[in-house]
Image (cartoon, rainbow, N blue to C red):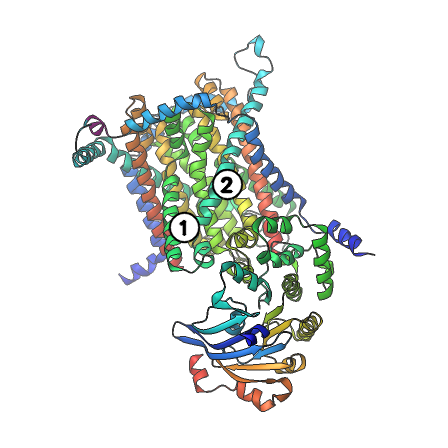
Amino acid sequence: MNQKEEIARLRSTRPRDRFVRLSMLGFAFLLVAVWFTGEFEVSSFDWDRRMANCKRFLGQTLPFPVQQAVDASFSEKLRLGAHWFSEQWQLHGGQAFRYTLGLSVVAIVMAGMASLVSLPMASWRLARASPYLLPHESVARWRTFVWGVSHRVFRFLLILARSIPEYMIAFFLVVALGFNAWPAVLALAIHNTGILGRLGSELIDNQATSGPAEQRSLGASRLQIYVFSAVPNAFSRLLLFFFYRWETCVRDATVLGMLGIPTFGYYLLEARAKDRLDEMLFFVLLGSVAVLLGDLVSMVLRWRLRGNS
Amino acid sequence: MSTAAQAAFRLRDVTVRFADLVALDNVSLTIAPGERVGFVGPSGAGKTTLLRLLNANQQATSGKISLLGQALEQLDQKNLRQVRSAIGFIPQHYHLVPSLRVLQNVLLGRLGQQGFWASLRSVFFSREFEQTKVHALLERVGIAEKLFAKVDTLSGGQQQRVAIARALYQAPQALLADEPVASVDPSRAEATMALLSTLAEEQQLTLGVSLHDQRLARAFLPRLVGVRHGKIFKDAPAQDWTDTDFEELYHLDQSDLVES
Amino acid sequence: MNRAAHWLGPRRSALLGILLAGMIGAWLIQLDPAQLFGRAQWHQLGEFFKAALRPALAYEDPNPASDGVFLSEIGFAIYKTLLYAAAAIGLSLIGGLVFGLIGSTRAWLALASPAKPFRVLSMSSMFLVRLVMTILRSVHEIIWAILFLQALGNLPLAAVIAIAIPYSATLGKVFSELIDEAPRATAEGLRANGASVLQVYVFGLLPTMLPDLFAYLLYRFECGLRSAAVLGFFGAPTLGYYLSLSWGERHFHEVWAYLYALLAIIVVCDLWSGAVRQRLTTHHAA
């Protein structure tokens, strides 16, 4: 056989994963193709008007007293601006700040507790007729079946919980619960329970099985294994996920206010309705500061956690 | 100047210092083209630093270095790439790209000689003549069957052969191998050394190999350079090295014990 | 005292601390359980949930002219949602790769020329990019969308860019971490062959990162679908738009039809990315 044929033979028998390859190619095609649908074209005629609009927008985002004081010196403008800021903070800013952070904390704590309770059902190593099966142990068929079905149903519920955007959950709940913190808290808690449940069950399922199997042979029950072995072993990683999700909770809490709950989003829409763009930008920036603060706290806590474990 | 042009590698009074550690202390060494040299000595003696110097991968604290007849301090970025590319280097742990195929990893050997777009074309859309060339090289090192295999599915010995093929694909004038037999099992070690030294002989490459095994060193390398405490301990043809020399080279004294 | 400290331990004190934080939070927002039971109007939602079993297959207001249009409208809404998400992910992939390269410590410190002024420049650009990424990420995509709508008027591209900005920053952060964690030796090996910095990035780092990068990108696409759908509440022609219209008319069967459509594409995407991740990780183990 000559070399050319040999190379062709090797090439045709090369190991490859068609599924992953097709996925990558298909996805790449999707990313490129959307730009040829015409959906996102911008006509240049429009563009001039839009730029003018943009200019007007930027001009009006300066604090109102500063806009008024056209001829004032820079330091005077700075003083006016600072005064305006403290006024806004006292009026609604500080309250929105506390409310957003408080809401995110309550929601993530609820999600954390709910996911801790749900993990024994979400982990496929624990949610089966005989977790960490011992040799020579036999399990009745119907029990295997019942556990299998209920585990799958539970997993599906978790997928549902994380698939519905939290904004939509809150949107629906406002009808029943009115304009208070509950719709936002519950929406964030439900969505994050789904995510923490998935992350946590992956952690437990990837743990070494030798320890739990040993405890099982000593007669430990499913719940005992979960409480005294699985959770303590995964604890620091679980906390990492918890704080990571808290960061996103703060971020999402800022916008849930748009449904009538007094976080930043509420005041932001209110300011827009009154066409007060300076106040609008104030709440955008303050919301950003709240998220950055959350990031910072979470970063310090996670950093300490890594150092300790 | 004329001697520098003749030598493949030439170090004059070279010192390398890391913080407060002197890795190489005032070393001078000349290696002629086509020579096959072994660097022997205990761990931490400076063998790896010496090899990295010969590949322009390590800056000297002081002293003069010329590689392939070019004085290192006179090279600009572009010429430096050319010199590096003309010296095939086989790192101890091979440093292959695990998620790419064998063919692509070997093609990476020419990176230093290609512009960015040319290398992109060559690695991801290789032409027939490139595949033929790589296949021939792999046949030479004994793993032609693995042309399209992913590197992370290969055994350690096979990966080493890929690294050798990659170095050869550079069409180098010199071949440097850092501890090629340290992480290979004993039965393979002899085969690896035989392969390196026949390759060097066939293609008239200058060969530099660092290793511990004195039996292999004497069997395959005509000239041995002993390195100890950052200094050249003995530099002589292999037949002039006695067992006592080796004992002395590897003898631990008080300072070694304190250091480790 | 000692016994109390012993009983507490790191885990129990962490749990207690978290519970305490939760209670302080509840006090801050005046969370009142009575609102959950006593005064709540759950029956209002009852009607909505009853409709869950019978999602609409046609408009609830019978209109002879629109027979069979409803299903095609759902298809259209799905198509638009996919379109917006994909466009946003495409943009953020580009942004994320650039951010990731500049924001990684490794790429700059290990590979760049060791000359001092260059080092100072690369270090400061790294910190600057990381700061910019954090700030861009801290503003929610809905808020970006509102700002753009206000500044540019209603424009499809604005919604896409609104999603792409925080997503670029998030992808950039993840990419820079991937680069920093990629095996150093490979890059140095290529460097020894005479490869340039760009070649090292493309041939040494990208292929090793690719599996993780792709798996993460699919996950972000799933998030992008959610974001795109929600932006419908603010005027983008995605599923959220139609859902909110039907909700306003109390056509709950239609709402469920849209909701099921959204869930279907997200669950399919979730399963897809899960399957890809599983293939890639098992392949790596082999």
- Residue identified by numbered label 1: A239
Question: Camera-side residue: A106 or B109?
Answer: B109
Chain to which the residue tagged by mark 1 belongs? A
Main SS of the magenta segment? helix
Q: Where in the figure is residue B36, as x and y percent of width and height?
A: 63, 76
Q: State the separation of the CA atoms marked 2 and 1.
A: 29 Å
Q: Amino acid at mark 2?
A: Leu
Q: Quadrant of the C terminus of chain A?
A: bottom left
Part of the protein shown in magenta: A62-68
| A89 in magenta | no
- Residue identified by numbered label 2: C93
Q: Which-is-in-front pick, marks 2 and 1?
A: 2
Please name the residue shown 53% across and 39% down the image: A154
Q: Where in the figure is residue A18, as x and y percent of width and height?
A: 67, 44
Q: Where in the figure is residue C29, as x and y percent of width and height?
A: 29, 35
**Where C26 sits versus B257, above or below?**
above
Question: Camera-side residue: B184 or B41?
Answer: B41
| A66 in magenta | yes
**Residue found farthest to the top:** C64
Q: Where in the figure is residue C133, as x and y percent of width and height?
A: 39, 43
Instruction: Using the rendered view, name the quadrant where residue B216 is placed.
Output: bottom right
